[in-house]
Image (cartoon, rainbow, N blue to C red):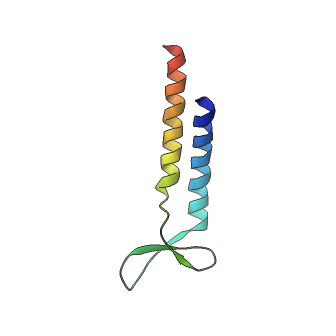
């Protein structure tokens, strides 16, 4: 479980950094919906940054649980 939690934690950090760098937010003036634009300028559906934060949080919780199980 420790290996999976470390992998989730690292994946969450990589996803968060990747989404912050690759996508930038913009407001669509036609329907006032928030969309994102990738590096090539195409408008794509929004990938929220909290996906990476959720992965990081789940990895940290799994690591904490696996670490506290050995102490009990």
Q: Residue 21 at x, y = what percent? A: 60, 64
5 in relation to 11, above or below: above
Query: Residue 35: horizontal and vertical position, in percent?
Result: 46, 73
Quadrant where the N terminus sits is top right
Residue 40 lies, with reference to residue 71, above or below; the image says: below
Question: Residue 41: x and y, percent?
Answer: 59, 80
Q: Which residue lies furthest to the bottom in this view?
A: 30
**The residue positioned farthest toward the left in the image shown:** 31
x 53%, y 52%: residue: 52
Number of marks: 0
Please, is residue 5 above or below residue 29 in the view? above
Side of 54 relative to 32 (left or right): right
Residue 58 is left or right of residue 13, and the answer is left
Residue 34 position in % (x across, y down) = 41, 73
Q: Is residue 28 left or right of residue 18?
A: left
Q: Which residue is drawn at 52% across and 15% down?
A: 71
Which quarter of the figure has residue 4? top right
Residue at screen point 50% across, 21% down: 68
Residue at left offset 57%, top offset 79%: 42
């Amino acid at each position: 479980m420790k290996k999976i939690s470390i992998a989730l934690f690292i994946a969450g950090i990589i996803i968060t950094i990747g989404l912050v760098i690759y996508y930038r937010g913009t407001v669509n003036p036609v329907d006032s919906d928030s969309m994102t634009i990738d590096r090539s300028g195409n408008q794509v559906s929004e990938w929220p940054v909290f996906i990476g934060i959720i992965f990081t949080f789940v990895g940290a919780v799994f690591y904490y649980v696996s670490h506290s199980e050995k102490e009990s």
